[in-house]
Amino acid sequence: MRLFFLFLIVVHVMPLKAASGPLVIVGGGGTPLAVRQLFVKLAGGKAARIAVLPQASSREDRGQSSVKMFSDLGAQVFIVELKNPKDARKRLEKATAVWFPGGSQAALYEALEKAALVKIIRDRHAGGLLFGGTSAGAAVMSAVMIPAMPEKPALRAGNTPITTGLGLAPGLIIDQHFIARRRMNRLLSAVLDHPAHLGVGIGEATAIIVRGKRFTVMGENSIIVIDSRAAKLAKPEKGKLQSATGLRLHVLKVGQEFLFGGK
C-alpha cells in the first residue's frame, strides 16, 4: 500500500512532457476566413500575439498582408525581421503563435538558418507553440522539403529536388497549390524516394490542422495523401525509373480527419 501511494506521489509531482503545438498548414491561393479565425483562436483570441516571419518573399511590403489578415480579427500582429537575430529571438519569445507567408520555402529556410533560429523554432513548437503558414510557409514545415519543381516531370529516382525543412511535421512531405498546379508527379516521386514519409498535397484555399499524429481538413478544395509505407518498392539508381506496388492513395475533403501514426 505504501508503495502504491508513493507511486501516486511520484506521478503527481513529475512534470508532464508538453505536447507539440498545433499546425495550421494552408495550400496557398488564399486563406479561408474560417481558417484565419481558428488560427487566431488557437493563438489566444484577443490576447493573441502573432509573429510573422516573411523571409520567403523578397517584396518590399512582405508580411503586410498577413499582418492585416490577422489584425482585422483582433490579434496583435508583428513582423519579425532577421537583421538582428538576437532581437528576433526576443520577439519570438513573446509570440503566442508564428505565421509563415508565401514565397520561396528555400529562401525562408536559408534565412532562418542563417539567423540561427531553426533550433529555436523547433524547440518552441515542441514546447507547444502554435505555427501556421501558407504556400512556401506550408512546405517549409516538412523535414523532407520540396524546394522547387524538377527540371523535367518524371518518376525517376532523385528527380524531385529535396532539401531540409523545419521538421515541424516530421512524418509528412507537404506540397502546396497541389491540384491547381498539377504537382502529383513531383510529390509521388518524392514519396517513392522517401517511403517512410506520407506525401500530403494541399489544394488552394484549403488547410490541414495538425494535432499530434492526426489532421483535419478545412477550406474549399481537396487534400491528397500518398502512402507508400506498406508498399513494395524497387530501389533504382539515381535517374532510373521508380516502381512500386501496393501504394495507398487517399482523397480527403473538408471536415474529414486523417490519422497518420500512433493514437
Image (tube, grey):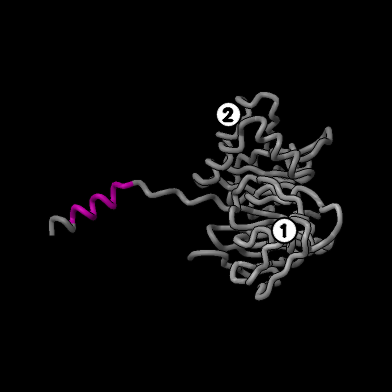
Q: Secondary structure at mark 1?
A: loop
Query: Which mark is nearer the camera, 2 or 1?
Result: 1
Determine which quarter of the picture holds residue 191. bottom right
Q: Position of residue 258 (x, y in %)?
A: 60, 68
Horizontal placement of 15 versus 208: left or right?
A: left
Query: Secondary structure of the magenta portion, mostly?
Result: helix
Q: Is residue 249 magenta?
A: no
Residue 116 position (above or below residue 136)? above
Residue found farthest to the left: 2
Q: Is residue 56 left or right of residue 11?
A: right
Q: Position of residue 235 (x, y in %)?
A: 67, 63
Name which of mark 2 and mark 1 comes first in the sequence. 2
Residue type indicated by callout 2: Lys
The 10 Å Cα crowd at callout 2, few under 14, some 14 to 19, many 20 or more, is: few
Q: Residue at x 65, y 75 (%)?
A: 246
Q: Residue at x 57, y 53 (%)?
A: 22
Q: Position of residue 141 (x, y in %)?
A: 65, 49
Does the magenta segment cover residue 10? yes
Dot 1, how many residues are within 10 Å of its Cα: few (below 14), some (14-19), or many (20+)?
Answer: few
Q: Quadrant of the N terminus?
A: bottom left
- What range of the chain is rendered magenta? 5-14
Q: Nearer the viewer, residue 131 or 186?
A: 186
Residue at label 1?
237
Of all residues shown, which one is farthest toward the right? 152
Label 1 is placed on what type of residue?
A: Glu
- The quadrant in which residue 99 appears is top right
| Quarter of the figure with residue 119 | top right
Disc number for residue 90: 2
Q: Is residue 256 left or right of residue 159?
A: left
